[in-house]
Image (cartoon, rainbow, N blue to C red):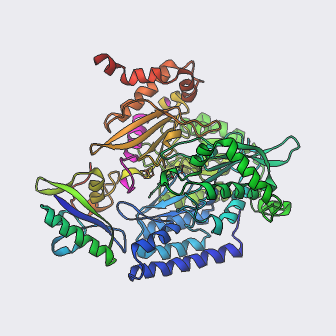
Amino acid sequence: MKIVAANRLTDGETVWLGAGDRWVDTIDAAHVARDPEDEARIAAAGNLALAANIVIDVTLVDVEIVEGRILPKRLRERIRAGGPSIHPEIGKQARNAALSAA
Amino acid sequence: MYRYDEFDQAFVKARVAEFTDQVKRRLSGELTEDQFKPLRLMNGVYLQLHAYMLRIAIPYGSLSPRQMRKLAHIARTYDKGYGHFTTRQNLQFHWPKLVDIPRILEELAEVEMHAIQTSGNCIRNVTADHFAGAAADEVADPRPYAEILRQWSSLHPEFSYLPRKFKIAVTGAARDRAAIEVHDIGLHLKKNDRGELGFAVFVGGGLGRTPMVAKKIRDFLPERDLLTYVTAILRVYNLNGRRDNKYKARIKILVHETGTEELKAQVEKEFDELRESELKLPEADIRAIEAYFAPPKLKARPEGDAVVSKAVKANPGFADWLRRNAHTHRNPDYASVTVSLKGIGEVPGDATDVQMDAIADLAEQYGNDEIRVSHEQNLILPHVARADLPALHAALVEIGLATSNAGLITDIIACPGLDYCALANARSIPVAQEISERFASQARQDEIGDLQIKISGCINACGHHHVGHIGILGVEKKGTELYQVTLGGSAREGSTIGEIIGRGFAPDEITDAVETIVDTYLARRENSNESFLDAYRRLGPAPFKEALYGHEAKAA
Ligand code: HEM
Ligand code: SF4
């Protein structure tokens, strides 16, 4: 299973490709591709947005579903989704109940 | 203190205008990310995990209170209320918005600051001893030479596209506090038998994937030849440095592959050709720049001894702090103070906007208007009257910056690691925090004595782990964090690269491993005067290996 992560051009905020190819700013709202075809489709959508100067640093991220929520396999992407693990009071983890890294 | 001349000011202003236009064109889509990335990097703008990052140059780590207040203001207005002081004596903001960066750079220019040459394959911000111009053991102030190098290297057309980044460090004391032997060029300012100033020149040091200690290629280079000789080194490097492989492109690899003698011969040959060129520094120019760095006029404060000894008796906390955080000044009425940014359990190198403002106030009140950033990620007030130390200490206690740990086990260097950095394999900061908490007791720290722990979150070694007495390197193994330990590194004169001690440790094992290493040292040292590093050099790795892994060997 994969999702697409990126950073928004204007402010660098981490965003994910959500339903209807809109960029969302919580990982919970990311669209999960469950087969190779859909994976290819979201990767293409990510690259299109890169070319359109909406986002930068587009990456395909391996995820699993844990207790009904999206959890990236790599710690790097989990921290990217929550914010610095040392500062629970800042980053996305402070604004919403995204699964934090720790 | 050095002041920008009109040329500098105009140049920085023009650069801000240029980058403002580039950001505008990026936001409108006129520039693609591929086109924009090298431009933003030239202006200190990186992309990390959560946001952009802005790296601001603090030449040779010197800051005025006015500049510090500007950094506090930027932290408050455009960032999340804090900044991170780095091992390169710079400051990084972790959360700036691209749309705000032109405005931030404009604000920085108002106080003669910028982010130029904090990235890219150019000559980076020149670093220097943080006690420069104050330390009792100094032969001469290294900052005028750092400044000469800064002026000469700023946007130097010939050296703006080197094979790889290039870092120069200068010290003016025999005790090397600037880690010159792990820089591309290290300069040790000294006097010859005739009392003339010049430099011992080291070349080819560096950390990263292939750590190397620099080789000395000149024992005494007259000061007038500084730029000529450095140009000769850079020409040899620019021509022969490996551009085919990013991992082999630093000058350390060239020195290693060419051989020190051969490289030295090439440099000397180039030097001979340049020797009488316009790069030769006129005596008057050197002295003029030196005048910018004239030490502040320090009033006689002979009451210092009495005030200090009274405070030592009255306040044990002050006594601890004095012992660790005050450094001998060349004026006996004064001291250089380390303001520790390593509070127990805090993030090494971070300071809040409130703390930055407070330090600026204290520098004005007690510090003759000077602040330094050390490569150990602390702040320094270089000129404080000893008579003011108790009052300064009390003020630092109030803002949580009076930790008495300079040079002790909790004075840990750590890079941002996986909490921020897109290149990281593992987190560094939480490891530093846990070790700091484990060794929080002042008595225990004092018992252990001088011990430097340095932590990097990947092999790039921004946290200098190779030269930590205890070095910790984060790696990723099967999707989880693992910490590799090296022992016996040092960035002082006669630098050494630490040796890997054995298999790595999981996040929940690493603090225990450090404690085992420390306990082994305490048990095996000859007496309390033998530091960790000395004991390690005498004992070698065997007793530490045995203590860390012995039980495994027996079990197997
Ligand atoms: C976005 C964050 C950063 C990036 C992308 C980055 C990148 C790198 C890279 C690629 C290297 C290896 C260079 C080589 O071996 O050729 C390196 C080395 C280094 N960086 Fe960083 N770094 C970052 C943050 C920092 C920070 C926060 C500090 C200071 C605390 C720092 C200071 C250094 C130092 C001292 C070295 C090793 C010394 C040497 O150049 O040999 N860097 N960095
Ligand atoms: S050492 Fe690695 S993890 Fe740490 S700041 Fe440098 S590049 Fe990032």
**Picture coordinates of residue A49 (x, y %)?**
28, 75
- The image quadrant that residue B100 belongs to is bottom left
Give the residue drawn at x 48%, y 47%.
Answer: B461
**Picture coordinates of residue B402 (x, y %)?**
52, 46
Range of residues picked out in magenta: B419-443
Q: Is residue B432 on the magenta stretch?
A: yes
Where is the N terminus of chain B found, in terms of image quarters? bottom right
Q: Seen in the image, is B390 located left or right of residue A17?
A: right
- The image quadrant that residue B151 belongs to is bottom right
Give the residue drawn at x 38%, y 51%.
Answer: B424
Q: Seen in the image, is B478 located left or right of residue B346?
A: left
Reply above or below: A75 against B47. above
Give the residue drawn at x 35%, y 60%.
Answer: B49
Between residue B89 and residue B484, name the one nearer to us. Answer: B484
Q: Is residue B470 on the magenta stretch?
A: no
Where is the C terminus of chain B found, in terms of image quarters? top left
**Picture coordinates of residue B87 (x, y %)?**
53, 50
**Picture coordinates of residue B526 (x, y %)?**
57, 18
